[in-house]
Image: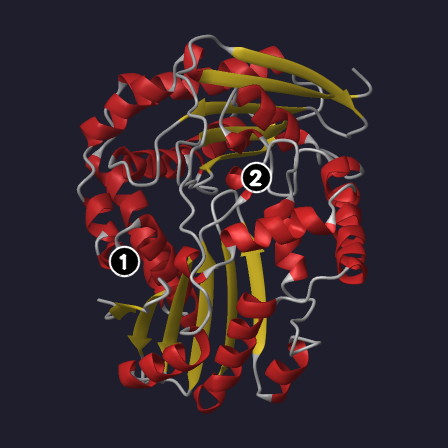
Amino acid sequence: MIHFEQFVLDNGLRVVVHEDHSTPMAVVNIMYDVGARDENPEKTGFAHLFEHLMFGGSVNIPVYDEPLQLAGGENNAYTTNDLTNYYCQLPAENIETAFWLESDRMLSLAFGEKSLEVQRKVVSEEFKEHYLNKPYGDVWHKMRELAFEKHPYRWMTIGAALSHIENATLTDVKDFFFKHYRPVNAILVVAGHVTVPQVKQLAEKWFGDIPPGEKYVRDIPQEPVQTIHHQLEVKANVPIDALYKCWHIYPRLDKRYYITDLITDILGGGASSRLFQVLVKEKQLFSNIECYHFGTTDAGLLTIEGKLVKGVSMTAAEAAIEEELNKIKQSTITEKELQKVKNKTESLIAFEDMSLTNRANSLAYYTLLGNTGLINEELGKYQAVTPEDIRNEANIIFTDSNSSTMYYYGDGQ
């Protein structure tokens, strides 16, 4: 059981406190309710660009890292299609340094043509290195566009096109900041060797006077139900043919999410999973194969992807996957196999909860979802899944009309 207390400042900043006096450290985590799904389709990649810009200094603190390092701290951040998260860990006795740093860049991020140009170049180079010039780097650009028609999950966090970042203006950046990076759209989690009264005092001192901003209300185009199979063939300079298949699944707060999560573990959760055992070890059709989902807040995708063994045809590889999917659709999984993946899930949750940083991040995310208490409730939702649930959902998800397939061929084909 992870204990926490919550309160809200007058400007709308939600604050969660998790006391853990077994450690001398503290974590300050700020999660903003903005991700790539909130971008203008003609100006994508801005959420990720801000992950870089936020470390470029604020009006009163030219270099973010220096004061934090002097206080014995370290920091990082990440952006997804759904959210943006910044966190730092430091000795609890120096925690006010983190409040000072985070509040100053929320209040007065240093905007300038020079800093924008620097970070624009950094992100552009990242785009080229990882998505344009890297083998298979364009897979998810193409796959998302294939699978989604309307929802902004159809572009990646890095952005839909390199030109969107290259052409970003200072006005564009400022507008995005003041729309999303406001107290009313943020969650502050403080965890570790702290007390609730201490955090209240520091939160009021450093964040209380920041103007709240306007609450961002999403109006995201909803993805229509897919009714026909989508297919794409790609030829590229890659050494091995690869097969990618996706199916639409459920939003993060849907109870069927937990069933789907366990299905991915049954099919592709490591070397003991069904797909790996049969298609890699026994039939030797794939050199590697995985089944996973993206855990997105809105309805996302379940994916099977694999690299084919040289000489294996795409037709044979796909047929073998379908055969394994038919097994999970037609035969009820045993309690023993299901319990094995439940045990794995329980172990992963327990392992993640050992980290103070992970606990802080999870508390922020569950608060963003609307129920901080989910941090203590999710394991029970996994344990409640039955073998019949697995078979029923497999039959709903794994239909041809709900799927998108990409055949990714090497140049030699």
Q: Please give the name of the residue rendered at 56% of the width and 77% of the height, measured from the top-left corner.
A: 101
Kindly identify which numbered label has been placed on residue 404.
none
Using the image, determine if residue 96 lies above or below residue 404. below
Q: Please give the name of the residue rendered at 71% of the width and 36% of the height, measured from the top-left corner.
A: 137
Using the image, determine if residue 225 lies above or below residue 194. above
Name the quarter where the N terminus is drawn: bottom left
Name the quarter where the C terminus is drawn: top right
Give whichever of 11, 134 is nearer the camera. Answer: 11
Farthest residue to the top: give it. 228
Q: Please give the name of the residue rendered at 40% of the width and 67% of the height, measured from the top-left corner.
A: 188
Could you classify mark 2 by the number of other residues whose Cα lies within 10 Å: few (under 14), some (14-19), or many (20 or more)? many
Kindly identify which numbered label has been placed on residue 39.
2
Residue 295 location in percent, x, y?
42, 41
Please indicate, yes or no, whether residue 270 appears anywhere in the rendered image.
Answer: yes
Q: Are marks 2 and 1 in contact (CB under 8 Å)?
A: no
Using the image, determine if residue 138 lies above or below residue 187. above
Nearer the N terminus, badge 2 or badge 1? Answer: 2
Q: Is residue 404 left or right of residue 134?
A: left
Q: Is residue 168 left or right of residue 252?
A: right
Q: Please give the name of the residue rendered at 64% of the width and 38% of the height, measured from the top-left corner.
A: 44
